[in-house]
Amino acid sequence: MKNFKRLYYMRIRIGQTAGFTLLICLMAMPLTAQLLAPDSAFNPVVRSRVTSGFLIDNDSYYDVELGDMPAGLDHPFSGIGKFGNAVIDFFRIGEPRQHMLDYAFADTIIAFKSRLNVIAGYDHRIEEEDSYGFWYKGFRFNSKLGESFRLRALWWNGGFYGDLDAAADAPLIDGWHTHKKNTIQMDNLNADISFRNRYLTAALGRGKFRVGDNISGSIILNDHANDFGYLLSEGKIGAFTLSFMHGSLMADSTRNVKLADESFSDKYIAIHQISYRHKDLWQIFGGESIIYGNRSIDVNYLLPHTFWRVTEHNQGDRDNVMIYAGATYDPHRNARIYLTAALDELRYAELFGNWWGNKWAVQSGVALDLPALSFTENLPPRLTLELTAVRPWTYTHYMNHTMYSHDGRPLGYPKGSNLMDISLEANLPVASFLYLDSIVSYTKQGSYGSSWQLNYGDWFSGAQIDNATADWFEGEISQTWRLISTIRFSAMAHNAFIIGHDTRWDPSPRHHIVAGWQLSY
């Protein structure tokens, strides 16, 4: 009996030791705590770097390297000398040596690092006859638990001043805002709690993503919209990756007005994708996105390994499904060719016909990195050429809770449909702290079936649903050239600056000048 007890307790100790050892190994994995892996379905390798403001950048894609931290609490107000060094650091050129609040803790089992930064800034936009500015402040929080867990948040609040009629169309206004006497006030939050190791990513957050390599905007899911709450997971086994996301959206009216009773329907987006990568040479992927609502979360769309189109058929064809597929080919470590196609709807008997319901989009490009011109490994110089074509009526629907949109912005291709677009982007460093980003594009578009806000139920009824046609560039044709160039200056420890110029010819030229400053301490 004594031997039995001794053996029993020995097994318990062995199990506890193995558990602690496994936990330590997980914590010690040489991984970054960044939310998304470099080859994630929601983190494309090729995406535009041109932006008109620091807050417009998608914070979901950026990770703050916390580096080495002394144990305990560190802040600028712990002494006169510390405060003096912090003031000097505010104006200093180089890497920051002081932050608003750091806290680190470590023992034999666990390691924790966290940082709280105060942010503030100003953006200004000058148009040909109007100008306005935007003052803001907020907080950025980053923390790592071991090497696999992360808690991150960015909150900001601000107001527009100057010509408020012009400010109402500002790119930053993509969600809630309120008009007051002399200002337009708004705020936003981007945050996540995540776990990632080499096999699994799991996250709960509020953010936005894009799917597929692109520079002019994704034809599957673009991030030119307000942030939204989501659940995200990705599992990787060998060469295969299964990706899944479910998000909560804000419904829009199909008639381009607010809903009569301000009672917005429940609305959700679900996306799943399976990818196969052959070494570092090529990758193929396929997936589905679905918009649904006016009911609670549908458990059918929480199964990432099933064919959702079949599920949608069996639920009365009441949801908005899009199927997509694509491939990337890397003939050289500094070159990438990509192709993505999305199918919103199609009648196979008229595959190459002009039935209005043949709604699809295709996007392809080539990106060349130029490491010989690089000053840093983080953002290599790059040239990207891209061609996009989107059929008329793509992304349109007839119910507010199934439109391919979120909070007044499209989730599909941001330039609309019934178009062809060619874009060329150059990302060139002038110095290690000075970046020049420029994109030029030509867009030819017909007005017929060109906007996600169109309710096709108002246009087609009865037999028209089966017989109506839609030709490329049908309607009033517009031809638009656009050139956007920005310069970012980031030599200072806590201050960054951006200035840019936006010119659009359609056909007469219109010019905008943008400038911005951001403090992160």
Image (cartoon, grey):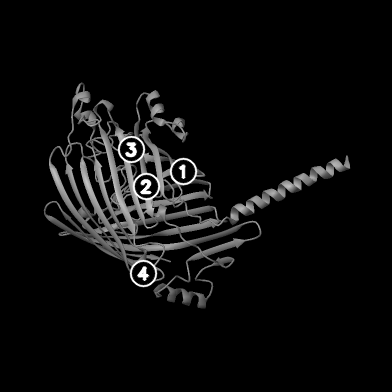
Q: What amino acid type should be assigned to the residue bearing mark 2?
A: Thr
Circle 3 or circle 4, nearest the eye: 4
Instruction: Specify the farthest residue to the front.
Output: 331
Q: Earlier in the sequence, mark 2 or mark 1?
A: 1
- The quadrant holding residue 52 is bottom left
Residue 94 lies, in percent from the top left, at 42, 73
Asked if the residue at tag 3 contacts the one at tag 2, i.e. Cβ–Cβ closer than 8 Å, the answer is: no
Give the CA distance from mark 2 to mark 1: 23 Å
Q: Earlier in the sequence, mark 2 or mark 3?
A: 3
Asked if the residue at tag 4 contacts the one at tag 3, i.e. Cβ–Cβ closer than 8 Å, the answer is: no
Which residue has dot 1 on it?
232
Q: Earlier in the sequence, mark 3 or mark 4?
A: 3
Secondary structure type for disc 1: strand
Q: What amino acid type should be assigned to the residue bearing mark 1?
A: Leu
Q: What amino acid type should be assigned to the residue bearing mark 3?
A: Ala
Secondary structure type for disc 4: loop
Give the CA distance from mark 3 to mark 4: 41 Å
Give the CA distance from mark 2 to mark 3: 34 Å
Circle 2 or circle 4, nearest the eye: 2
Q: What amino acid type should be assigned to the residue bearing mark 4?
A: Phe
Give the CA distance from mark 2 to mark 4: 31 Å
- Whether residue 308 appears in this view of the structure is yes
Give 457 or 241, whichever is nearer the viewer: 241
Give the CA distance from mark 1 to mark 4: 34 Å
Q: Earlier in the sequence, mark 2 or mark 4?
A: 2
Residue 388 lies, in percent from the top left, at 26, 45
- Please tell me the numbered disc located at residue 220: none
Which residue has dot 3 on it?
251
Which residue has dot 2 on it?
328
Which residue has dot 4 on it?
433
Vertical placement of residue 193 versus 73, above or below: above
